[in-house]
Image (cartoon, rainbow, N blue to C red):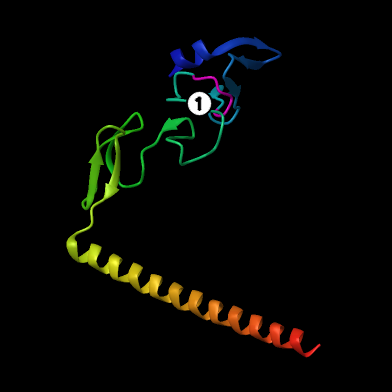
Amino acid sequence: MAKIIILLIKDIKRNQCLCQSGYYYDEINLPCLPICGDQIIVDEEDCDDGNNDPFDGLYQCQFKCQDECQVCFKDKCYQFKDNYKLIEAIYSCIQICNDQQQLKMINAMIAMIINLMDVIFVNFNIAIILSILQFRKFLQM
């Protein structure tokens, strides 16, 4: 551990460490720790994209795979949980649905479409009724 600390310290002035670029001084833990988010990749960081987005494959300066991944190496997933399928070209996964699940999803979509058609039909009828009422009002003038 002392060897790493010596390499990270750039200079000592007034009994305080001056850290190399990409590191900051931490009196509590270690003299110099990496600055995550400065877009400078140092030894302890896999990456540093300068943001805190946990869904872009990089988070807290470490590679990150999607939650369904069981074996992850440098943001590429090589094995997924059950009911997921690996898409090798992008090292990502999709959920596998069995026939029963797909049938339930299709039935739910059909029910939603029927409800939407009912709403459209009611709105169309209301528009016709309003048009007739406006036309009658126009004729009475």
Picture quarter containing residue 140?
A: bottom right
Magenta stretch containing residue 39, yes or no?
yes
Q: Residue furthest left?
A: 99
Magenta highlight: main SS: loop
The picture places residue 6, in percent across and down from the top left corner, at 51, 12
Q: Residue furthest bottom?
A: 140
Residue drawn at x 27%, y 32% as measured from the top left? 89
Graded by Cα atoms within 10 Å as few (under 14), some (14 to 19) or many (20 or more), the crowding at tag 1 reads many
Question: 38 left or right of 48?
Answer: right
Magenta stretch containing residue 11, yes or no?
no
Residue drawn at x 36%, y 32% as measured from the top left? 75
Picture quarter containing residue 111?
A: bottom left
Residue at the spot of label 1: 48
As displayed, is residue 52 above or below residue 2?
A: below
Q: Quadrant of the N terminus?
A: top left
Picture quarter containing residue 100?
A: bottom left
The one of 88 and 47 positioned closer to us in this rendering = 88
The one of 99 and 20 positioned closer to us in this rendering = 99
The picture places residue 134, in percent across and down from the top left corner, at 71, 83
Residue drawn at x 71%, y 13% as measured from the top left? 14
Span of residues in magenta: 36-41
The one of 51 and 105 positioned closer to us in this rendering = 105
The picture places residue 118, in percent across and down from the top left corner, at 45, 78
As displayed, is residue 8 above or below residue 106?
A: above
Residue drawn at x 45%, y 72% as measured from the top left? 116
Question: 56 left or right of 132?
Answer: left
Q: Amino acid at mark 1?
A: Asp
Q: Quadrant of the C terminus?
A: bottom right
Question: 106 left or right of 122?
Answer: left
